[in-house]
Amino acid sequence: MSILSGKARLAGVIGWPVGHSRSPRLHGYWIDRLGLDAAYLPLPVRPEDFADCVRALMRMGFAGANVTVPHKEAAFALCDIRDAAAEAIGAVNTLVFRDGKICGSNTDAFGFIENLRQSVPVLPRGPALVLGAGGAARAVIHALLEAGYTDLRIANRTRARAEDLCRAFAREGCFLAPLDWSQIGPALTDTALLVNTTSLGMNGQPPLEIDLTPLPTDALVTDIVYVPLETPLLAAARTRGNPVVDGLGMLLHQARPGFAAWFDQPGLPTVDEGLRRFVLG
Ligand code: ATR
């Protein structure tokens, strides 16, 4: 870590636990590359202490913080001001302290779609099939709707949660359909974009076992899981010739707006192969 002055700008990631977070490495890479007088710290905060700690950070002169599991909904509730993505998703992952106010945004949707945009020449048009209906699915669905997708199918083990999401994200001119887990196979036949937002396939979790046979081979397949980088879903899709995008880029891209805001940057920091390797290392 570089030597800090008394005027160093400070930010960090608030989570519980937070030891697994790659955000300090990610922001540290940019701070180092840009030679900034700044630090980004891991901030382990218990749920019951969340609001007090956020207010204390603001009083201590922090520029802001990222918020991760399990605090994203609490952060949403605590904010004085929220951006449109946070309002739509119902969760906040980026806090900026400005004029004594807690300003919250959700950059997960931005991270998801920017990762796709950077990874493929053009986004596929046509129906998107989203697997899962948790917090990550909310960010992905918001991103897809904002990117112009008008036909979304949401398949979830607990169908009622998929139904809730379809209701919550309903908008004029868009078709959102909840599916049972057993309906994934038939839905694959005209899917242009397949997104896993469940934790299945993550190291230590059960695999995501779906038969990709009905999926067109030009459909784009992406996973928000990035440990392992190539999940069994992505491996199966790649083997049969589908274009695939791994989930690491979503993490990297979601970090860019916060970094620019806290550390007073004129533009968003770049995501490149060197950063990917460093964050994984
Ligand atoms: P997050 O906020 O990270 O998205 P979450 O809200 O716990 O986390 O959601 C996890 C998602 O993975 C949910 O869609 C969950 O399905 P349920 O709503 O039925 O719980 C899905 N999931 C987790 N374990 C699963 C499993 N064994 N089979 C199918 N889906 C699973």
Image (spheres, grey):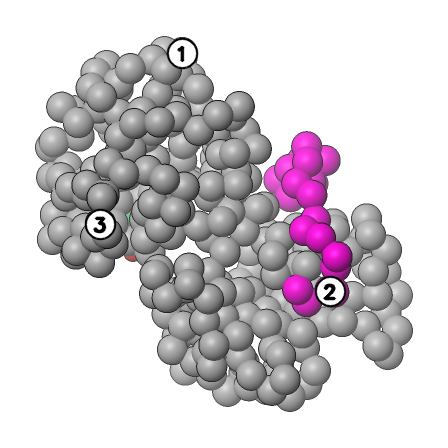
Reading the image, the residue beneath label 3 is: 172
* Magenta stretch in the rendered image: 261-281
Estimate the x, y position of residue 142 in percent, counting from the top left: 35, 50
Q: Tell whether 175 sits left or right of 86.
A: left
- As drawn, the label of residue 194 is none
Badge nearest the viewer, 3 or 2: 3
Estimate the x, y position of residue 90 in percent, counting from the top left: 34, 65
How busy is the neighbourhood of tag 1: few (under 14 within 10 Å), some, or many (20 plus)? some
Q: Secondary structure at mark 3?
A: loop
Q: Marks 1 and 3, Cα distance to the nearest angstrom?
A: 35 Å
Residue at the (47%, 77%) spot, across then down:
81
Reading the image, the residue beneath label 1 is: 241
Residue farthest to the front, as pictured = 173
Q: Amino acid at mark 3?
A: Glu
Residue at the (68%, 67%) spot, across then down:
262
Estimate the x, y position of residue 230 in percent, counting from the top left: 47, 28
Reading the image, the residue beneath label 2 is: 263
Q: Marks 1 and 2, Cα distance to the nearest angstrom?
A: 42 Å
Q: Which mark sits nearer the N-terminus, 1 or 3?
A: 3
